[in-house]
Image (spheres, rainbow, N blue to C red):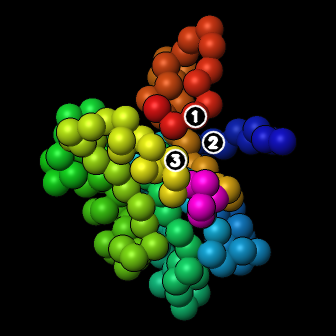
Amino acid sequence: MIKPRVFGNHESMSRAAARWMATELRAKSDALFCLATGSTPMRSYAHLRDVNLSKGGLLRKVRVIKLDEWGGLKADDPASCEAYLQDTLIKPAGLGKRYIGFRGDAPDVQAEVNRVSRWLQRNGPIDVCVLGLGVNGHLAFNEPADSLHPEAH
């Protein structure tokens, strides 16, 4: 059950989120984190990197899967979610071998969705999912709607 918490500002929320993620990693060092991009989690990731450095490799076993991606963008496009995660957390924390992304420019989108779905079936479940809440209430690329699509899409 999610317990909503209210913070006075973005920085205090970011620090609390990083502490919570660190607590989850202490409980399960190889946890599977599903990470969003955007302005909401950016400072949390920076604080998590700092905790990783100060606590001697807290992130050494964590596994990470990217939450979403812009359709049509190549991984090295600076506007891609891939570039954001690589620059913000994956490369600085040395998570390359424990990270799974997916191609926004895949020639066969359904095949890419199926690949990620199979990976999750073999390696899941997701232990921690970091989300940001958009101005219009969207979570990830799921805009407010009358119905949900719980599978990978």
- Percent x, y of residue 55: 58, 87
Query: Which residue was labeled with disc 1?
Result: 151
Residue 18 among those drawn in magenta: no
Instruction: Tell me how many marks there are.
Output: 3
What residue range appears in magenta? 120-124
Residue 121 among those drawn in magenta: yes
Q: Amino acid at mark 1?
A: Glu
From this view, report whether residue 90 is shown above or below residue 128: below
Q: Amino acid at mark 3?
A: Ser
From this view, report whether residue 106 is shown above or below residue 21: above
Residue shown at 63% from the left, 75% from the top: 30
Residue shown at 42% from the left, 41% from the top: 113
- Percent x, y of residue 15: 58, 60
Q: Amino acid at mark 2?
A: Gly
Between residue 135 and residue 115, name the one nearer to us: 115
Name the element at disc 2.
loop
Residue 1 in view, yes or no: yes
From this view, report whether residue 80 is shown above or below residue 91: above
Query: Which residue was labeled with disc 3?
Result: 117
Mark 1 vs 3: CB contact within 8 A: yes
N-terminal of the pair, mark 2 or mark 1, is 2
Residue shown at 27% from the left, 37% from the top: 108
Left or right of 5 on screen, residue 151: left
N-terminal of the pair, mark 3 or mark 2, is 2
Q: Where's the N terminus, which quadrant?
A: top right
- Percent x, y of residue 149: 58, 24
Name the element at disc 1.
loop
- Percent x, y of residue 94: 37, 79
Query: Which residue was labeled with disc 2?
Result: 8
Q: CA distance from mark 3 to mark 2?
A: 38 Å
Name the element at disc 3.
helix
